Image (tube, coloured by chain):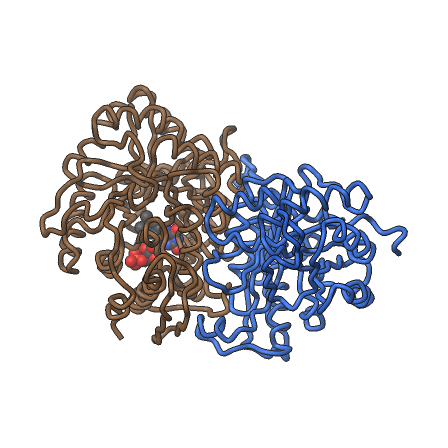
Amino acid sequence: MSTFKKPGFLAIELDGAGWDGADLARAVLAAESAGFHAATFTDAPVPARANALQRAAFAGPVTHTIALVPEVDTVYTEPFHVSTQLASLDYVSRGRAGWIATAADAPEAAAAVGRSAVTGAALGQEAAASIEVSRRLWDSWEDDAVIRDVATGRYIDVDKLHYVDFQTPAGFAGVGYSVKGPSIIPRPLQGQLPVLVPASLLGEVRADAVDAVLVSAPAAELLAAEVRDVRARVGASIAVIAELDVVLDARGQDAAARDASFDGGRAAFAGSAAGLTDFLADLLKEADGVRLHPASLFVDVEELGRLVLPELRRRGALRPVAQGGTFRDLLGLERPASRYATAAAAAPAGAGK
Amino acid sequence: MTQHTRAKSEIFTPSGQIQFGVFFQGVNSGTIWKAAESGSQTDFESFRRIAQTAERGLFAAFFLGEGLRLREHLGRPHALDVVGRPDAQTMLAALASVTKNIGLVATQNTTYNDPADLAHRLASLDLISGGRAAWNIVTTDNAWTGANFRRGGYLDHADRYKHAEAFVETAKRIWDSWETPDGPASRVLHQGQRYTVDVTPRLPRSAQYRPVLFQAGDSPEGRNFAARQADVIFSAHPKFDDAVDFRKDLVERSVAAGRGANAVQIMPASEFILAPTAAEAAEKKEWVRSLQIGPQQAIAYLEQFWGRELSTYDPDGPLPEIDPVVEETSETRGSGFHGAKARQLADQWRAEAKDKGLSIRQFVTSKTARIDSTFTGSYTAVADHLAEYARVGAVDGFNISPWLIPTGLDDIVNHLVPELQERGVYPTEYRGSTLREHLGLETPVRTADEAAAAVRA
Ligand SMILES: Cc1cc2nc3c(=O)[nH]c(=O)nc-3n(C[C@H](O)[C@H](O)[C@H](O)COP(=O)(O)O)c2cc1C
């Protein structure tokens, strides 16, 4: 596999750019000009951090190539809102949006909305249900639903809009629910946004419901094996993305001396730019992509952009950054037809009413 | 920041100024999609173009509406009008990066959201935009819209505003919870009938302290709610006499609520059809109306009250002689019409149309609400008319719905704004960097403790 594998991609977590618009723009532009393919926005509930999806939306109009991928919780949110917000992000980023679907397991998240805490396998069920709702709603307007037909006075062709009639499956551990549809926004530019999940949610979330899996390991030397493991479970068509904390020798300071307090239980790399380049070149033979969590956003991004990404590009380990490309293009995914497209003639919206 | 701009008083003092907002409507029949120059309703470029034009014209605010289920007509999605629009806050967060001054107003519903989540997202927008966010609080709810949500939802009218008020009070407590810009935040607890919140807020105050609050409900309960809670009311009363009455009504309510006569500003929904001369404007209006209410819309409008298909009727002929199917009356859901007695209404309308000699199309054009909110005329005449509103303080501004996207504000900004500036009734620069400053609103001065005390159990 490694001989024929396509070059990989690099994502960067922009945590550290919390809520100030100017900081946010500076961070995402630094990541884009450093050559990263994707920026992610954590929604972990820590102080002084604005809503992840809005941070990504703010970055949309000021960037051109970088994919913008916020975390959005699936447990304590309304799936209908989540779907609409993500579709809107796709519009404001001209097709560069993705979604890291998470399942909040902190009791505080439940208390904030007055629900009882969801735990264990139920978390994955919530994620699976919410992903399914979004996917159906994104398909609920066929691509050519807006017809603007002056002769008949119709702005849309109602036969190309579809009720999604989602219902949580039997055995759903939480409070079951239904979503009617159709969406209130036309189909996203990408048709379907790429959906990423942490590997911990696989199982309840079926691999074929997602486009990429985020893989963690307790130490850097275990990461490649973990990637191989997940690859074996999900198959070749799902992108496997390795998670890596990074602290580099920078500004005359040794990585070891720099204060890096990583918390995610992720594999970490501390050392020189050259060492990281070699490590990533090897890792990208196994993983489709790597997401870096820099110890210091501005310090490490500068070093990465100056020393690591150019060298990986020179070695042919990285995909080109495509002008005008979508996030799906980056992941090598086709733009899918709406699941309702062929059923249009058989079951138009409202036919059953 | 402007503090205590107009002192709390029982006497209303006109500011002598008007401001503009722009309401990018999307879903409705007012936006013309049939003209060659009609652009996309979803592409970001359309939004950017409107927002940047508005900012060039020193508009105070850019508004987005919200409708959480597609309008339906006779049991299927309504096909004849513009439909499909982005999520308000996502779009506004994107616009924040390509605008500098204009306020960003998101219409958001109190029934289908959680207070802690919505307050956090609005605070996010407020911070990201440097203190330019506002929330247009709406309470529209029905089980039909609830079918899109986990929580479902239907409240009767009185409960709707009780719930909305507890919701807004909780949101304010969340925004007020940081004692100093560096925190710490105090925990916010609310145990109410409809929801429970237990949250330690995560975001500090913005440059304008907290999002500005707009309200857009017109019932007595809605107006009282606005008088107690809102900074600005997005009203449905733009005609001069009506606007003056509405001001009087709102001043009374706001004094009764203990907030003084000047606490709540008024910006009615409006539409402008302008040209160099009155004759050209009148001609333009004919054209605009013919595209807003085409033959199919005219028939569909009646169908929603008749509850049956009327497509065999001639739009240029008289109203249908057949009667509505009363029990099946199916108003275009989501359009805001409620429970008209169809048979009675049909009789009344037939008589009215006959009396005035109106065809279906002419009758429907005369019935649509927007008739009352349109200002038609030459740039100078309309400017003179608006200056009169400013002089008596009938309104604080107008929330303008452009009938063409994305060029619909061009003539307003290029021609009407300079006329108003010449008359001394329109800003010549942005007063500051926040929406609160543009509008000349007082900065709230509550602390977290006072906020907690203000919530009635
Ligand atoms: C000018 C104006 C604009 C409104 N825009 C919206 C909107 O975008 N979304 C919505 O759900 N309701 C909207 N509403 C509805 C009101 O907020 C309110 O929920 C509705 O009028 C019912 O309340 P009421 O009985 O107090 O009038 C609007 C109302 C007015 C007057």
Residue A120's quadrant in the figure? bottom right
Tell me which corner region of the image, top left, top right, bottom left or bottom right, holds residue A207: bottom right
Q: Where's ligand 1: which quadrant? A: bottom left
Observer-nearest residue: B123 or B40?
A: B123
Q: Does residue A200 lie above or below B284 as drawn?
A: below
Q: Residue furthest left?
A: B11
The answer to whether any part of residue A344 appears in the image is no
Closest to the observer: A256 or A319?
A256
Q: What percent of the width, then of the height, locates residue A187?
A: 60, 49
**Relative to residue B457, is residue A324 drawn left or right?**
right
Residue at the location (72% across, 64% down)? A215
Q: Nearer the viewer, residue B236 or B258?
A: B258
Q: Which chain is blue?
A: A
Q: Nearer the viewer, residue A52 or B22?
A: A52
- Report the residue at 59% width, 63% height from top: A261
Is B42 rendered above or below residue B69?
Answer: above
Residue A324 visible to an observer of this rendering = yes
Could you tell me residue B1's position as x and y percent? 27, 45
Percent from the top left, x then y, of residue A269? Answer: 70, 59
Residue at (27% x, 68% y) in the render? B449
The hue used for chain B is brown
Quarter holding residue A208: bottom right
